[in-house]
Amino acid sequence: MKAVTAKIGLDGHYRGIKFVSRVLRDYGAEVVFLGFHKSASAVAQVAVDEDADLIALSFLSPDYMSHVKDLHEALKAMGGHDIVLILGGLVDPDDHEQLRTLGVDRVFGLETKASDLIDYLDSRTDRPETASTKET
Amino acid sequence: MPILAGLVGDLPFDWKAVTSGDRRALARAFTALESADLDVLSAIADRVFEHSVDVPTVGMTGPPGVGKSTLVGAVTTELRRRGATVGVLAVDPSSPRGGGALLGDRIRMANHAEDPGVYIRSFADRRVGGGLAPAVPLGAELLAVAGYDVVLIETVGVGQAELEVARTASTVVLVLAPNSGDGVQADKAGIMEVADIFVVNKADVGGAGQLERAIEHSMSSVPTEGASAWTPPVVRTVAVRGEGSAQLVDHVLEHRRALKGSGALVARRTEQARRWIEALVLEAALAEQRSKLEGELRESVREAAVEVATRKVSPYRAARRLHD
């Protein structure tokens, strides 16, 4: 599995995204870690170029909806609409439904444990495998 | 859809789209390269070599933390300024546990993510050793066919036995930084001998002059085979500010001219091809033996292990017996 992890926008709290990147790595994924202060279009382009199976974003600022919208549009335009998108951090439960319409497969809250993420990844094994996960 | 798959020549992506500059198709092609499926690799290689283009492939290698990624970013900026398109293959190590990897090289190349003239792909080395990932040699050829004018290859941070890039690149750049280990470390690795160009990065930090002298001293004691037309230059850079990247690109182009002029490029490509073929033959033999060990030999190995453990026979004799 290939994943892209990033923070979009000006929010610089990056403990969460680092944690998620490590959990993904230990799950056997090859994780392209982009760091923070990225634009939605840059994340989309990287995910397409890397032929990623998964994009994981973390938000601790309230402006996530517009960023997710931009990302969704950019992915569609680049032919990356099949890439699974997950979100973590401080997200209003009232927004979950709208996020779902923007292609977000799952939202993880602040209390998420590594095992929650692993259970989710296990449930998504319909995703195409990469050689790294096949070999082990 | 096996019938359709047959029509496109058994490739899990659109080859035409790759050669006409479609990034999505190119990305899919790289995933196929990473699949390690020999039939797929062979089918891709057939097409790649049919359309083969010889472009400069520049390997950037050096110890961890000397600024290789940042320098690749700076060199990319310089090449773009000169109008060339750039393909980048950046390799990071796979994690020793779990087989996953954290690939962080792109953080230092962020400016180029949305440039249509730059394609960057991150690889985990999948613990094959040598500082490269298995898909890189064919990946470099693929980028050339996809229309990129220059290919940059960034190796994992090298320790003392990582020379694989010399078997792929037409120019090898060894990046060092002050206080990142003295010349003896590089001498041990034998990387001094494969470098075509030396870079002293972080040249604004104290100790750059000392490192430069150490490199020159080390080079003067490297035995040269015959009358080599090329003396590796030492270039000072401050990659975070882009300083020295123009000189570095000049040296890369000059090195290529020198290689071509002396006929050494053909010789180098031939030597690299020889090693590539040998590696593939060895790989096939290894796969064959491995499948035997997991199949028909499995029981015999188990029995032999009991004999070895009880000191009835040595492991060497047991292995030879299984092999015969």
Image: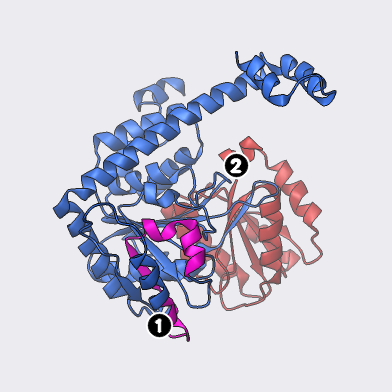
Label 1 crowding class (10 Å Cα cut-off): few <14, some 14-19, many 20+?
some
Whether residue B109 appears in this view of the structure is: no
Q: Nearer the viewer, residue B278 or B14?
A: B278
Magenta residue span: B183-211
Secondary structure category for the residue under label 1: helix
Spot the residue most to the right.
B310
Instruction: Please give the name of the residue rendered at 40% of the width and 61% of the height, measured from the top-left corner.
Output: B192
Camera-nearest label, 1 or 2:
1
Q: Report x, y in % for residue B305.
A: 78, 22
- Chain A colour is red
Label 2 crowding class (10 Å Cα cut-off): few <14, some 14-19, many 20+?
many
Give the image quarter of residue A5.
bottom right
Q: Nearer the viewer, residue B206 or B248?
A: B206
- Looking at the image, residue B139 sits to the left or right of residue A29; the answer is left
Q: What amino acid type is highlighted by mark number 1? A: Gly
Q: What amino acid type is highlighted by mark number 2? A: Ser
Q: Which residue is mark 2?
A: A132
Q: Is residue B186 located in the magenta-colored stretch of the structure?
A: yes
The Cα–Cα distance between marks 1 and 2, rounded to whole angstroms, is 43 Å
Give the image quarter of residue B89.
bottom left
Instruction: Please give the name of the residue rendered at 41% of the width and 41% of the height, measured from the top-left corner.
Output: B29
Share a chain, discs 1 and 2? no
| A130 in relation to A68, above or below | above
As drawn, the chain in blue is B
Chain for numbered disc 2: A
Secondary structure category for the residue under label 2: helix
Whether residue B6 appears in this view of the structure is: yes
- Looking at the image, residue B150 sits to the left or right of residue B125; the answer is left
Q: Which residue is mark 1?
A: B209
